[in-house]
Amino acid sequence: MSIDQIVNTDIHQLSDAGWRRKKREELRAEGATAMIGFLRADALAELQKEAQAGFDAAYFNPQTHNIYLTQPDPGLPASHIRNKEVTSSKGCICDDVIAASSPLKQLYHDPLFKEALCDILEEDALYPYADNLSSVNIHYARKGEELGWHFDNSSFAVTLMIQPATKGGAFEYVRDVRDADIDEMGFIHAEAVVDGSKPANQLNLDAGDLLLFRGRNSLHRVTPV
């Protein structure tokens, strides 16, 4: 499939400087930008069929972790936000299981798509993961599963919704909770987010929507499905 067969370029004009500028400004202002109806219907249907077929091969690994994705600090009490544990559970199939002909891989490696992402994300260049299992993944969430509150280690993430949950599974985030570059971990702010006293922004993506998100300093989660 060509990029025009995968992406709804009538709406999301990857080569257009004005479209890129709009998305770049949204990302700067909000810490996230959603591209609604990013995939064309045929590409989405193919991807949904592929994802369903891969479900039995998915590896599920429920785990607990703190929001910083670090080891506990024995110098602080277990109740401290630095040590407080949340739960994450998801299934995953990795790059080696996903066919080279998949719309996901064609999109991931497409030069125009990468060029547009560089412009929006204000990056000089983008490269595939050195870990050859991590470039393209499909994630699954069964009933009751979630991604607990956390910060990302990477500066940005690119996520495509293949099929939303019938209930739950919303993406929630709060911007600028910490500043990792100066080692300011934002304990008080983070505690308020996790205990619910600080409201979060919520995004509900539909099938075929693409999200660019800066999660290094923004606390975020996916609510239980």
Image (tube, rainbow, N blue to C red):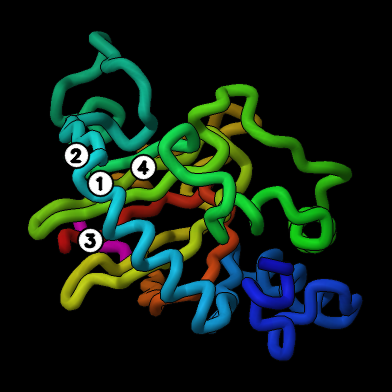
Residue at left offset 36%, top offset 22%:
70
Residue 3 screen position, x and y as percent: 72, 69
Q: Residue 114 versus residue 225: which sits nearer the camera?
A: 114
Whether residues under marks 2 and 1 lie with C-beta atoms below 8 angstroms apart, the answer is yes
Identified by mark 2, the residue type is: Val
Residue 51, image x, y percentages: 34, 57
Tell whether position 196 is magenta: yes
Q: Is residue 131 left or right of residue 90?
A: right
Whether residue 223 is visible here, answered yes or no, is yes
Which residue was labeled with disc 3?
A: 223
Closer to the camera in the image, 192 or 225: 225
Q: Residue at x 66, y 67 (%)?
A: 1
Question: N-terminal of the two: label 2 or label 4?
Answer: 2
**How many circles with numbers are drawn on the protein?**
4
The label number, if any, that marks residue 86 in the structure image: 2
- Mark 1 in CB contact with mark 4 (< 8 angstroms): yes
Is residue 158 left or right of 200 when viewed as pictured?
right
- Check contact, mark 4 vs mark 3: CB within 8 A: no
Kind of residue at disc 1:
Gly
**Residue at disc 1, secondary structure:** strand
| Mark 4 nearby-residue class (10 Å; few <14, some 14–19, many ≥20) | many
- For the point 43% across and 60% down, the residue is 174
- Identify residue type, mark 3: Thr
Q: Position of residue 204 (x, y in %)?
A: 36, 76
Among the two numbered marks 3 and 1 on one chain, the one whose residue lies closer to the N terminus: 1
Q: Which mark is residue 148?
A: 1
Residue 141 position by quadrant? bottom left
